[in-house]
Image (spheres, rainbow, N blue to C red):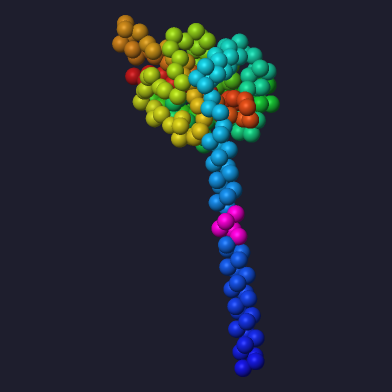
Amino acid sequence: MKKASVVIYAVAGLLAGVLLTLFTLYTLIPAVTREKSREAADAAPVSNAALTEAALDTAAYLKNNDFEALAETVHPDYGVVFSPIATVNLASNLSFTARQVESFGSGTDKLIWGVRPDSGEPISMTVGEYFTRYVTNRDYTCAPVVTVNYTLRVGNARENVTDIFPGASFVDLCYPGTVEAEYTDWSILRLVFEPYGEELRLAAVIHSEATV
């Protein structure tokens, strides 16, 4: 009887310890989650004006090949992704750190930036060639239409920016096309920004255009 009592008390003590641990975790984890949710809710939303200003500044850096200034806008943790079409593919699109962006001006190697939507062929270009074709093909600092978190023109490529960059904001610098071309000559430079502290940092540079 004495041995049985000792065993019963030991098991009871063990169960009590497990229950106490579970109760502590149960009460602690929701508290942490609530605190994070409260911090997110208290974060000041980014205004459309601030996003537009950041986009136009960034477009100017891209236009002028001011890679030092551009590097300062790059997200310090995730870098910046370049996509030649609206469908962002993190497995095939290139991503660069701020330090790598600073050296864009001296890059002469051909890189694979993605694949062509019409043929599926790899897009093999130097930084300069890629910029000429997919970034500065038009003067986006003078884009006639600027939209925030809204896409005016949609082509055959799937729009997935909000899926790839949840919580981010994007600005479309858009040339909507002309009547003469039946609006098949539109193109967009889409700049994606993520909050970093109290700043906006560049997360992606996306090109979108009509495909016929």
Task: Give the position of the N terminus as an image quadrant.
Answer: bottom right
Give the vertical position of 70 relative to 17 (above or below).
above
Residue 96 makes an appearance in the image:
no
Q: Position of residue 12 (x, y in %)?
A: 60, 78
In the image, what residue occupies the spot 60% across and 14% down?
61
162, 115: nearer the viewer: 162
**Residue displayed at 45% across by 24% down:** 149
Q: Which part of the image, by quadrant, shows the C terminus?
A: top left
25, above or below 134, in the image: below
Which region shows up in magenta? 24-28
Q: Position of residue 195 (x, y in %)?
A: 58, 29
Q: 171 or 126, which is in the foreground?
A: 171
Name the residue at the bottom extreme: 1
Residue 25 coordinates in the image, percent (x, y): 59, 58
Q: Is residue 204 magenta?
A: no
Say which residue appears at 65% left-offset and 86% top-offset. Answer: 6
Q: Is residue 17 above or below residue 88?
A: below
Q: Can residue 153 be seen in this view?
A: yes
Which one is nearer the viewer's eye here, 129 or 99? 99
Q: Residue 118 appears at what percent x and percent y?
A: 39, 25
Q: Main secondary structure of the magenta part?
A: helix
The reply to whether the magenta stretch includes residue 26 is yes
How many tags in the picture? 0
Is residue 70 toward the left or the right of residue 116 in the image?
A: right
